Image (cartoon, rainbow, N blue to C red):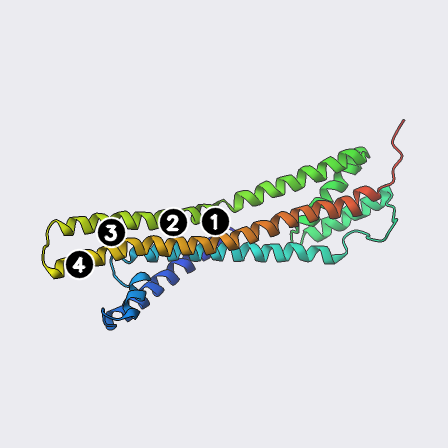
Amino acid sequence: MKSGKLINLLISLVAAIVFGLIVYGIGSVVSEESGAYRLLELMGANLPSGFIQILTYFLFLYGILEILRMNRQANLEEHAFSLGLLPEQEQYVLSAEDVAQIKLKMVELGRGTPYLLVETIKRACTQFRANKSVAETLDVVSAHTNLLSRNSDSEQALIRYVAWAIPSIGFIGTVIGIASSLGAANQVTTQEGIKAVTSLLNVAFDTTLVALILSIVLMFFYHLLQERVEKLHANIEDYVMENLVNRIYHREPV
């Protein structure tokens, strides 16, 4: 998992730099009086001031790649529901011996792909075999799915930080641009000088505009991911409770 994050980091960095150089190269051959140049300037064609846009592109791409990686993980976990891990027939009852067999089956499956559903079933079976208490088995399932949710939330923390950092960096670019334009305004009075000040102001507000747009897009896909992961954990708990815990028949000791 850490290697996946590192790969996404390197891909994002390279892609952002390449994109920034392409925009800069196109901007260097386009007339500054054309509308196309203004669009390229918005995208960061003015280097070194366009470095702010390149930095926001890097963070945006990294956030998107992390979301895609976690979506792939969710696809894998959702596949486990189609494996028939537990009996799903109506009114099917499980004995203590059945639970033991299910535990052995989960142990074998766990040596392959480490599905969260398999691990949850295995823990439920282990708890039931330990004290034969259906109520405590139910508590273990709930506690384990809550732990999975917290772990997933922790894994998503970097995406939330990136989504916060993008507009913050855009605002930093705006402050730098305004400060540069005010400094230039104190030193020039000619028409060309005024044009240079205006260009600096364009750069100042461009950084915030680009950053806000990228942040909105990133947050949209992040919330879709968050909703999907929360549903996955809820489905894991419901599946184990419905097809394992609620089907166990065991006479409690008097």
Q: Which residue is mark 1?
A: 159
Task: Tell me how far mark 1 sits from mark 2, CA to CA.
Answer: 14 Å
Q: Quadrant of residue 42?
A: bottom left
CA–CA distance in space, label 3 to label 2:
15 Å
Residue 167: assigned label: 2
**Tag 1's secondary structure?**
helix
Q: Residue 134: where, in percent of width, then height?
A: 80, 36
Count residues near mark 4 (Cα–Cα under 10 Å), then give few for <14, some for 14-19, many for 20+.
Answer: some
Real-space CA distance between mark 4 and mark 2, rounded to the nearest whole angstrom: 25 Å
* Helix, strand or loop under label 4: helix
- Whichever of labels 1 and 3 marks the residue nearer the N terminus, that label is 1
* Amino acid on which disc 1 is placed: Ile
On screen, residue 9 above or below 148: below
Relative image position of residue 116 (x, y in whole percent): 66, 48
Report the residue marked by disc 3: 177
For label 2, count other residues whose C-alpha is less than 10 Å away and answer few (under 14), some (14-19) or many (20+): many
Cα distance in 3D space between marks 1 and 3: 27 Å
**Along the viewing direction, whichever of 56 and 100 lies nearer the viewer:** 56
Q: Residue at x 44, y 55 (%)?
A: 62
Residue type at mark 3: give it. Answer: Gly
SS at mark 2 in the image = helix
- The tag earlier along the polypeptide, 1 or 2, is 1
Residue kind at label 4, given as amino acid type: Ala
Query: Looking at the picture, which amino acid does disc 2 mark?
Result: Pro
Earlier in the chain: of badge 3 and badge 4, it is 3
Q: How many marks?
A: 4
Circle 3 packing at 10 Å, graded few (<14), some (14-19), many (20+), is: many
Q: Which residue is mark 4?
A: 196
Q: CA distance from mark 3 to mark 4?
A: 12 Å
Tell me whether circle 3 and circle 2 mark residues in contact (CB < 8 Å). Answer: no
Label 4 near label 3: C-beta < 8 Å?
no
